[in-house]
């Protein structure tokens, strides 16, 4: 009997959850619990970490999970790594549902870095006005460059004071659109954009806006995760679920 654990937290995960629910699948949606009020899903939902690989392995057994779909964000490297280790140990079929990385077009001015530190170092010395659209988990690294004014877009208002002396906070939850992001960046006189190569549509608006405004984008490449099968659409995941042995 197929019972699916869907590791969520992205636009793709929400799309897959809808299809699974419509098909009456026996599935559980899982959030990390990063935001105060996550978007509700049409599947039974659990919120919070599992407790590392061990906790996830115990969950798979206790809940008789027969398949895991990792539809977390490409930067959720720890979750994806844990899922590979736990599923390999348990012999539970696992696939990732991941959107391809963004590629720069001819009018894009991207500066590629492979980590957050690289993005900090890529900023100029002279004070700039930076749209830092990478969420709240990596802000402390930018305290090394306090001379810039940072525009932060966060899902929830920060509980603690920010580690940046000159910062404006925009509370918003994606997906975002190009017109909205263009207006936001013009209002704040943005000179640089910093983005994670999230891929997909939910976070791409700021790239279109930067291109239209002729602004440079410091693009942070994806972290490494262990090899596992990667599907690129809901249909591919559904086909994998129906063809992989229980
Ligand atoms: C909790 C679920 C959907 C999913 C929407 C996607 C698109 C909108 C754009 C910018 C970049 C950023 C951030 C962002 C986007 C989608 C998708 C995506 C980026 C929610 C969600 C959860 C999270 C966690 C949150 C992080 C933060 C990252 C904000 C829900 C809304 C910056 C990454 O406050 C925090 O601690 C926020 C943490 C991880 C990155 C970070 O390091 O701070 N997402 N985002 C998931 C959970 O609890 O398991 O709350 O409803 C989901 C989405 N965020 O339903 O359509 O699919 O990528 N999320 C990034 O991608 O660049 C904003 O401003 O342009
Ligand atoms: P992460 O660093 O890879 O994960 C850290 C820990 O958070 C994991 O080890 C796990 O805790 C827990 N966790 C992560 N995703 C989970 C899930 N879907 N269900 C249950 N526990 C989960 O993850 P992250 O980068 O903080 O991202 C957290 C969530 O936000 C992910 O679900 C991701 O899809 C979503 N998101 C992240 C980004 C981003 O930029 N990172 C962007 C958009 C959405 P235990 O070890 O205790 O099991």
Image (cartoon, rainbow, N blue to C red):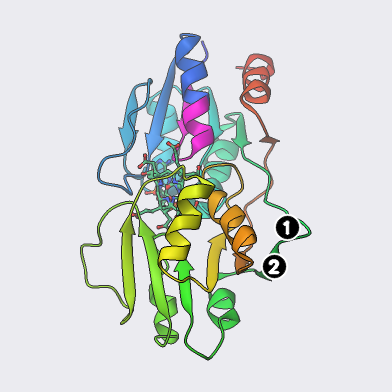
Is 139 left, or right, of 228 in this rendering? left
What percent of the width, then of the height, locates residue 118?
59, 76
Q: Earlier in the sequence, mark 2 or mark 1?
A: 1
Query: If the image is split into quadrants, where does the C terminus sit?
Result: top right
- Residue at position x 56%, y 36% in the image: 87
- Given residues 34 and 147, the one toward you in this image is 147
- Above/below status of 118 relative to 174: below
Q: Which residue is mark 2?
A: 109
Report if residue 197 lies within the magenta region: no
Q: Are circles 2 and 1 on residues that touch, CB within 8 Å?
A: no
- CA neighbours of label 2 inside 10 A, class few (<14), some (14 to 19), many (20+): some
Please report the bounds of the magenta region as a residue range: 3-15
Q: Is mark 2 within 8 Å of ligand 1?
A: no
What percent of the width, then of the height, locates residue 39?
34, 34
- Residue at position x 52%, y 22% in the image: 66
- CA neighbours of label 1 inside 10 A, class few (<14), some (14 to 19), many (20+): some
Q: Residue 198 bears which disc, if any?
A: none
Report if residue 11 lies within the magenta region: yes
Q: Residue 104 bears which disc, if any?
A: 1
Label 1 SS: loop
Res 58 → quadrant: top left
Asked whether the viewer can see residue 134, the reply is no
Q: CA distance from mark 2 to mark 1?
A: 8 Å
- Residue at position x 44%, y 22% in the image: 64
Is 229 left, or right, of 43 in this rendering? right
- Given residues 50 and 112, the one toward you in this image is 112
């Amino acid at each position: 009997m197929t019972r699916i654990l869907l590791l969520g937290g992205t636009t793709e995960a929400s799309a897959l959850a809808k299809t699974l629910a419509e098909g009456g699948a026996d599935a559980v949606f899982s959030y990390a619990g990063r935001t105060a009020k996550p978007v509700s899903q049409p599947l039974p939902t659990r919120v919070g970490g599992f407790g590392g690989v061990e906790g996830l392995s115990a969950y798979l057994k206790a809940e008789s999970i027969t398949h895991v779909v990792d539809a977390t964000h490409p930067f959720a490297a720890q979750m994806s790594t844990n899922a590979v280790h736990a599923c390999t140990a348990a012999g539970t079929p696992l696939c990732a549902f991941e959107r391809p990385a963004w590629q720069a077009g001819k009018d894009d001015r991207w500066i590629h870095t492979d980590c957050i530190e690289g993005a900090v170092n890529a900023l100029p010395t002279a004070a700039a006005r930076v749209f830092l659209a990478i969420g709240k988990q990596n802000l402390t690294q930018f305290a090394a460059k306090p001379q810039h004014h940072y525009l932060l877009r966060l899902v929830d208002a920060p509980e603690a004071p920010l580690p940046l002396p000159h910062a404006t906070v925009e509370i918003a939850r994606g997906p975002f659109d190009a017109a909205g992001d263009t207006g936001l960046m013009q209002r704040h006189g943005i000179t640089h954009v910093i983005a994670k190569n999230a891929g997909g549509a939910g976070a791409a608006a700021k790239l279109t806006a930067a291109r239209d405004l002729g602004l440079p984008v410091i693009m942070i490449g994806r972290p490494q995760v262990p090899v596992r099968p990667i599907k690129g659409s809901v249909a591919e995941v559904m086909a994998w679920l129906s063809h992989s042995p229980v």
